[in-house]
Image (cartoon, rainbow, N blue to C red):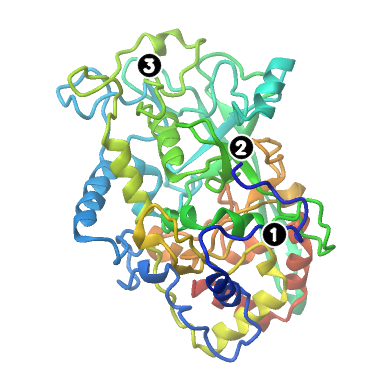
Amino acid sequence: MPTAIPSSAGDRVARSDLSPKDLARVQAVTTPTSDFSKAEPFEIKQGGAGTSQHGVSRDAFSHFAPNITFAEEQDFKLGNALFTKLWVSSPSSTQASDGLGPLFNARACQSCHVKDGRGHPPEGDRDATSMFLRLARGPATAEERAKLERLEMMSLPDPVYGGQLQDQAVPGLSAEGRMQIRYDEQALALSGGETVMLRRPTYSVSDLAYGPLDPSTTLSPRIANPMIGLGLIEAIAEEDILALADPDDQNGDGISGKAARARDHRTGEIKLGRFGWKAQNASVRDQSSGAFAGDIGISTPDDLRHFGDCTSAQAQCLASATGVQARLGDTEAPDPVLDLVTFYAKTLAPPARRDVEHAEVLRGKQLFYDGGCTACHRPKFVTSRKADNKAQAFQLIWPYSDFLLHDMGEGLSDGQAVGDATGSEWRTPPLWGIGLTQAVNGHTFFLHDGRARSLTEAILWHGGEAKAARDLFAASAPKDRKALITFLESL
């Protein structure tokens, strides 16, 4: 990585983009507050000058950052059209839109990221489009182990079914299988006489069309993450994230955040991972190209898999037609498709906060801070002056994440290592916009697999490094738990 991963929380590397004077200003403004009598300056603008002011609606996550240029608005709208575009199987008369699959999970980016928001598990009459199963196994040879250590691969796919279970297929081809979920309810008593039911999921696969999974293959469910603020996250100075890492817990606070490494898909350079449930991607572009190939089966200049996630064991899939059109380029989504979709993803605006001066919100904020939640959910950053887009440079933003890997305990473990992340480690998800999940997506399912049906359940699933904060929440008076949830709902 350009900047070495610190060995302890005491190791600090000064930001190269700031003068000493600016550095002092940034450190002062990003220090978590201890005054909860009023809202902090600019707290309402979660995305800095790039904050959406459109208010609460189903489209709250779908607005462009208001500080991009007029010319960039056109690129945003073109990117939006490609993000919502439905791809079709080959061959097709719509030659600029074919190449789907042949095996796939979705026909469009927005099929998973509905309204640019949060995915959901299959629930009642809801389908499984915005949730799928990652497939991975441990290394069987020294060569495979070396590839993982060099980050040439973030995980090893199932030899037959690849890196994720594809539950859809083009005509004439069988889908790989179906995800099955069984929930077991367990009661958890909280202080004040309240009881919360938590549902523990068990995952399996049915209707496997190409033989059995490898005995060592693990299943990891993943729901789609919200799309807001991704460009601002990419614009956070690497030094500021690395400065929060304390992998050996040398400061003794019980929190041992670990920086994830990821290999840039274009340059091969090792960079800081900050995107995905296990921080397996270093950039929005890498996240986008991987989704095109893995989820939809569409090749791009950054990921040349014309057959998506098909493996050498799936001969019929590899014999299918592709959507590559020589007159358009050598991939199914040639330039500038990936450029435009990436720009769209990078300029979706975080929504403005609500009720920041409300007494209940301020009290809940203090409980959130006093309870140790900000040790992982770091409130704010000032982005780099060297950000690729001027609109995202030197902005005070409030994502409430440190973008590090944390051990969340056995309860949330999927047993699946991805890059530097172990089976029980997950990237701290940003919290901005979390209070609008119901308004945008019509549900309140949280965590990587949507098992939590409320913010309360999501907190109570925290374990590992977050166990002390979870236990404090469970032991709090009911009115204090309610206040903390009210604060989260204001984000």
Q: For the residue marked with disc 3, what is the amino acid?
A: Leu
Q: From the top left corner, tell me how far across and down residue 485 is, in percent.
A: 59, 74
Can you say whether 412 is above or below 218 in the image?
below
Q: Nearer the N terminus, badge 1 or badge 2?
A: 1
For the residue carrying disc 2, how many other residues have a C-alpha within 10 Å: few (<14), some (14-19), or many (20+)?
many
Which residue, given by chain and number where applicable, does mark 2 sit on?
A: 220
Residue 195 vs residue 240, the one in the foreground: 240
Q: Which secondary structure lies at badge 1?
A: loop
Residue 336 found in image quarter = top left
Q: For the residue marked with disc 1, what is the amino acid?
A: Arg
Q: For the residue marked with disc 2, what is the amino acid?
A: Ser
Q: Nearer the N terminus, badge 3 or badge 2?
A: 3
Q: Nearer the N terminus, badge 3 or badge 1?
A: 1
Kindly identify the residue that appears in the image at 65 percent across and 23 percent down: 147
Q: From the top left corner, tell me how far across and down residue 11 is, in percent.
A: 74, 57
Instruction: Decide if residue 138 is on the left or right side of residue 314.
Output: right
Comparing marks 1 and 2, which lies closer to the viewer? 1
Q: CA distance from mark 1 to mark 2?
A: 35 Å
Image disc number at residue 12: 1
Mark 1 touches mark 2? (CB < 8 Å): no
